[in-house]
Image: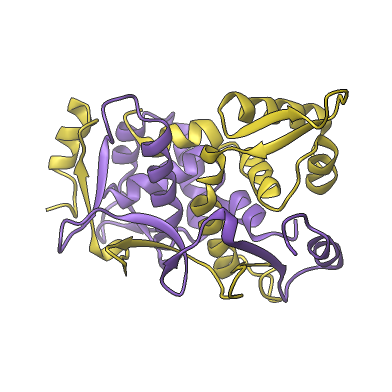
Chain colours: A purple, B yellow
Amino acid sequence: MNCSIARALAEVGERWSLLIVREAIMGSTRFEEFQARLGIARNILSDRLATLVRAGVLSRTLTGPRSRIASYLLTEKGESLLPVVAALLQWGDRWLDDGKGPPVLLTEAATGLPLRAVVQARGRDVSMRDLRIEAGSGADARTAKRLAVTVGNP
Amino acid sequence: MNCSIARALAEVGERWSLLIVREAIMGSTRFEEFQARLGIARNILSDRLATLVRAGVLSRTLTGPRSRIASYLLTEKGESLLPVVAALLQWGDRWLDDGKGPPVLLTEAATGLPLRAVVQARGRDVSMRDLRIEAGSGADARTAKRLAVTVGNP
C-alpha cells in the first residue's frame, strides 16, 4: 500500500512484536526474560525475535566471546517506536482501565513528571478536528487523486 | 495481562483495525468506501467493523430514516487513537520510505504546519534515554515486583 501506516503495521503490526518492543523498553534483553515475562510460546518468540532483528528493530549480539547466550537490544529504529508504544499505553490507560488505575507509569527520569504522547504542530497540541491530510512527494496517482477529494480535507 | 499496551493491542492491535481507523480519519464513512480503499475482503471488513463498533471505537448509524446504508464514524474513543496512528505514520515515513518521500502529509489545517507525534513531559520532548518506568495504582503484585528490579529503572 502507498501508506506509511500500512508499511509500519506490516513490519511491527503483529501483536507480539509490539509487546516484545515493550519488554525491550522495560529492560529485557535475553530470550528467557522475554519468554517468562510475556508468557509467549518459545517457537513464536523465536520467530518474532528473528523477524525484528531482520527488520533492524532489535540487534542481536552474543553476551560474551565464548557465550552462546544472545542479547537483544533496541536499535535506533527500535527506540524510535517509543511514541507508538507510549500512545498505545496512554490509550489503554484511558479507555481500558479496569477501575484500578494504570498498571505502569511512564515518567521522565530526571523530574518524575508524567509523560504524554501527543500530536503537535510547533509545540501546540493538535486534535482530530484541526487535521489536514495532504498528498506528499511519495504519493502515487491513486493517493493523490483520492486526497484531492477526501471529505474533511477542504 | 496487567498492561495497558497489551489491552490496547487486544482491542485494536489487529492490522486491519488500525487501517480502518486510518480510513475513518481520512474521511471514509461507508462500507463501500472502506472496502474500495483498503482492498479488504468483504467478510473480513464486515467482521472488523462490527468489532470496532462493539469496542466503541466506531459508531454505526443509518444515513437516513428509510436508509439501509450505514455510516461509521469515529467516537471520542476512536478519535483519541490519533497519537497512535500519527506515531505509526511518522515511524513508517522515517524508516520505511521507498525513496520517494512520504505518501501522505499530516498538517494542522489552520496553519499548514507539519504534525509531529512526540512523547513529552511538561512540553519538552523525552526520548528513550530519559525514561523511567514505575508501578502505577493498577499494578498487580507481579508487575510491582518486576518494576522494582527492572534494568535501567533505578
The answer to which of A115 and B102 lies nearer the viewer is A115
Compared to residue B133, the image places residue A55 above or below, namely below
Residue at the spot 30% in from the left edge and 38% down from the top edge: A32
Q: Is residue A109 left or right of residue B9?
A: left
Q: Quadrant of the N terminus of chain B?
A: top left
Q: Position of residue B71 (x, y in %)?
A: 76, 34
Q: Position of residue A70 (x, y in %)?
A: 33, 51
Residue at the spot 63% in from the left edge and 27% down from the top edge: B53
Q: Position of residue B34 (x, y in %)?
A: 78, 42
Taking the view exactly as shown, the residue that stands out farthest to the front is B65
The answer to which of A13 and B3 lies nearer the viewer is B3
Residue at the spot 70% in from the left edge and 53% down from the top edge: B26
Compared to residue B70, the image places residue B110 above or below, namely below
Residue at the spot 30% in from the left edge and 34% down from the top edge: A37
Q: How many marks?
A: 0
Quadrant in which residue A123 is drawn: bottom left
Q: Position of residue B57 (x, y in %)?
A: 58, 34
The answer to which of B122 and B47 lies nearer the viewer is B122
Q: Is residue A129 left or right of residue A151?
A: left
Compared to residue A102, the image places residue B129 above or below, namely below
The answer to which of B2 and B114 lies nearer the viewer is B114
